[in-house]
Amino acid sequence: MSVPYLYHGTCSRNVRAVLKRGLQPRGKKASIWSAHPSRAGHVYLTHAYASFFARMAVEKGYQMAIFRIDADKLEPTRLFADEDALESANRSKDEARMPTLAQRTKYYRELWDILPEAAYWETSLDYLGNCSHDGPIPPDAINAVTLIRPNSALCWMSDPTITRTNYILLGHYYRALTAWPFEGAAAVAREKGYSDLADKYMAKLELSPSPFADDYMTFHCPADGWKSITPSILKHCEKQHRSKDGRHGAPAPNPVHSDRGR
């Protein structure tokens, strides 16, 4: 595929289930985006906003988790445009018959399997940085996972307004930031030189020593699969963090499903 990796951000309480069973659509579980809920049968993916989505999904006492997915291990016919990208791209022609944002977003969310433009997932990535996958993503398509401390400096490096304009201005920065915990300097080098503003933001990722060195931990999938290192990863997933009032959050039961972060 033209895109080597896609990413999914969530809470580390989901890591055990994801590494065993893959990324599952939310199904009947409530979406964290109540105003514009996600497609219940899809897993949402990004190459720009994974840390932001993880921050929105993280629960007290847990870490942010970002999964990196090998796009070549996904079936292209199961990838679809994000409904927000479709709504934004078609807003001018749709406003007369669907005057509200809620109407337009619902239209593209529910008719993904009918509308021809919903199949343009690569255009969706280029336009807004996000897309979706119909059905579960198997664990063997996940080749790395990063855990990021909530409220760390790295956590707050991604605080975007997800709009077309913002993506034009800072998309290169957000893509570099998403890949940086997995690739380091190579992620920045790939995205530099296209936008002076994005380059200015990326400069923080190039500092040496890195101010973010203690903010994250990345695990790559061994040749024999995730099973051998899952116990090590889980030790860090449920590490509790002191809240502002001095108390620790209590880990909650580990669910099977992982909601999207959008």
Image (cartoon, rainbow, N blue to C red):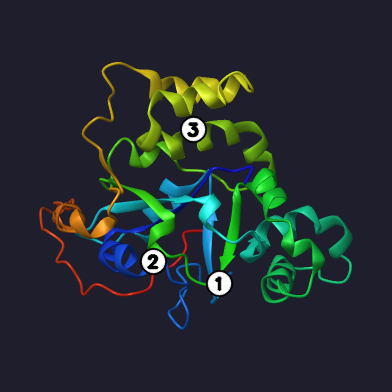
What percent of the width, then of the height, locates residue 96? Answer: 89, 67
Q: As displayed, is residue 85 above or below residue 133?
A: above
Element on which disc 1 rests: loop
Mark 3 or 2: in front is: 2
**Residue at mark 2 to residue at mark 1: CA–CA distance:** 21 Å
Left or right position of 67 against 59: right
Cβ–Cβ below 8 Å for labels 3 and 1? no
What percent of the width, then of the height, locates residue 99? Answer: 81, 68
Q: Out of 60 and 85, give the one closest to the viewer.
A: 85
Which three-letter amino acid code belongs to the residue tagged 2? Gly
Mark 3 or 1: in front is: 3
Disc 2 residue crowd, few under 14, some 14–19, many 20+, Cα 10 Å: many
Which three-letter amino acid code belongs to the residue tagged 1? Pro
The residue lying at 47 percent from left, 59 percent from top is 261
Left or right position of 223 against 193: left
Residue under label 1: 37
Specify the farthest residue to the bottom: 28
Residue under label 2: 22
Residue under label 3: 176
Element on which disc 3 rests: helix
**Residue at mark 3 to residue at mark 1: CA–CA distance:** 27 Å
The residue lying at 27 percent from left, 57 percent from top is 226
